[in-house]
Image (cartoon, grey):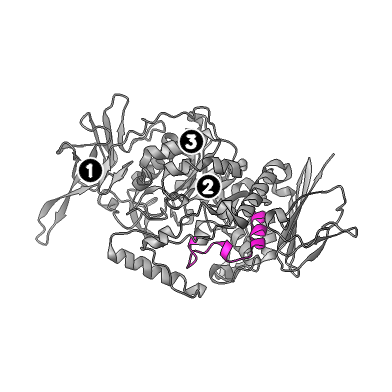
Amino acid sequence: MQLDISKRKIGLNFDEGGFAEIWLWAPLITDVSVVINDLNTSIKLEKIDNGYWYLKTDKIKTEASYCFEIITLSTDENQQSQKIKTLRADPASLYQNKENSIAFNVNSYQWTDQNWKGFELQKYIIYELHTGTFTPEGTFESIISKLNYLVDLGITAIEVMPVSQFSGGRNWGYDGVFPFAVQNTYGGPQQLQKLVNACHEKGLAVILDVVYNHLGPEGNYFSEFAPYFTEKHHTPWGSAINFDDEGCEGVRNYYIENALMWFRDFHIDALRLDAVHAIKDSSAEHILAEIKHYTNELSELTARSYYLIAESDLNDNRYINHLEDGGYGMDAQWIDEFHHALRVTAGQDKTGYYADFDGITQLAKSFNDAYVYDGQFSKHRNKNFGKPANNPGEQFVVFSQNHDQIGNRMLGERSSTLVSFEMLKVMAAAVFISPFLPLIFMGEEWAETNPFQFFISHNEKELVDAVRKGRKEEFIAFHNEGEIPDPQSELAFTASKLDWEKPEIGNHKLMLNYYKKLIALRKNNPALNTLDRKGTNAKADEANNTIILSRKHPKQEILCLLNFSNDIQNIAVKNLSNKWQLLLDSSDKNYGGSQLNNTNLAHNGTVNINPASVLIFSLTNE
């Protein structure tokens, strides 16, 4: 079936006349009817080309509850065929109420963001949040109430962790089983549209985290409809999504339609694609490249900018190289290695995957080269790993914390409970002075101490037991002590909610002011907000655990001194004179520092810098 970028042609949609149109890809069934629960009636779908079924009817109204009665043939032990009837939800449902799908008119929302065109990726200052734990209410509506706070902080884009329907009401979102449906406990699809619209009115872009590498384990019946999975490849979650085996065209179409829907129908500005290294595709055109191709077409049609941001741990810039250069066309990618080098430099134990990182020398390398491993031997992987990337700075996203690096700790501890208050400020500065896109995780900006733990709300006991067992095995390499929080317990969820009283008190308030200052410096200084990697140079002093980072722009030069040690350091800096302006001292008392050393710039070409602190200087070029 020919894909139409102007409208969705999968699942249930309403046309301008109010008729419901259904497209269902189900080549493995012999017959199918849509069951309209409210009317206690059913209507057969017509079989059309390439395994698709179609129906147009005026019997289904908005908010009607429906499902499919699918008929398959089964052969018994006597080789006799029999028909098996099963009721299943719509695989492309936009809204779910337990086992039933809810008819939703995605075009019914009255948008007021017609003048919104988006903005360049290099202007993104990203705030990652989890809808269920960002506010006490845990809804899209409650996020809207915090948008003024985010604007005041200086954020330009929020990144919402996955919202596709999952089992129960508590989940990170990566166990979604209905990729098109918006989680009902968060408010459903129209509330998501309302949130995006409100963000655009405030000048905020919206990034949505999506999962195209697997489907959740509970309530996943997709294989009854079509060959959504393949034994040709395997992932950590089992059989891979079928992007390149027999019958894959319908699967590819399904996920392309999904990406286009978020952009076109929900006005999302960017998608963050989870773990693209687990997307297995040996086709002549990789599925990511095909998604990018259609995204570009949609952008031309709507005159809006849309971005695709990949999470990848392969250190392979083929993912972010342009389509015309043989790449997959992703606009940016996360760099976990910057985080790992930063955490080890700040004192993180070298266990698990941190064992590959030696600290400050590799942090300086990441400042300069993005990837730490770009061809060297990796002990953790026991092989040579990665290749150099000359891509521009806006194609890399860096962070000192994110949902994975906090939540995948055994106890879900945030950095605020692992390192000193002063070291937190150094880690934050490292992110914002980098020539890359900065991302912070909700609550990080006020040094939130509540954990962000892994939580689920599955219904199947065997699955819950398997998750518990898997969590225990995951932390063997980290040698953590203590009991692993039960991910099924509601306590793991409630303990992970932000405490919105903290930003108003004590050191939390001072840290918030510090983040506001960092973000303002990033926005207002061309040497920092122009992401030219050629103008970046970082040099590490391994003996003293310090870095000198320079950022150059035709109008300005920025010099950043980072001291990760617990001692005052005297750093020799060439050509530093009184013409340089001190923009930031993280040890300033205004940010909760002790400011032991009041004279930073000495007359002998050295700079005194306090323990665990950052100094940022600026020189304006005449």
Q: Earlier in the sequence, mark 1 or mark 2?
A: 1
CB of mark 3 within 8 Å of CB of mark 1?
Answer: no
Q: Is residue 446 above or below residue 326?
A: below
| Residue at the image position 61 percent from the left and 56 percent from the top | 506
Q: Quadrant of the C terminus?
A: top right
Residue type at mark 2 is Ile
Q: CA separation, marks 3 and 1?
A: 32 Å
Question: Is residue 393 visible to the viewer in this orientation of the structure?
Answer: yes
| Callout 3 secondary element | helix
The residue beneath circle 3 is 198
Q: CA separation, marks 2 and 3?
A: 22 Å
Residue type at mark 1 is Cys
Determine crowd level at label 1: few under 14, some 14-19, many 20+ residues with C-alpha closer than 10 A.
many
Q: Is residue 127 above or below residue 108?
A: below
CB of mark 2 within 8 Å of CB of mark 3?
Answer: no
Q: Residue furthest top?
A: 17
Determine crowd level at label 2: few under 14, some 14-19, many 20+ residues with C-alpha closer than 10 A.
many
The residue beneath circle 2 is 309
Q: Is residue 234 above or below residue 534?
A: below
Q: Earlier in the sequence, mark 3 or mark 1?
A: 1
Find residue 153 and report its horizontal and vertical position in percent.
60, 45
Residue type at mark 3 is Ala
Find residue 283 and report its horizontal and vertical position in percent.
43, 49
Report the magenta residues as a range. 407-431
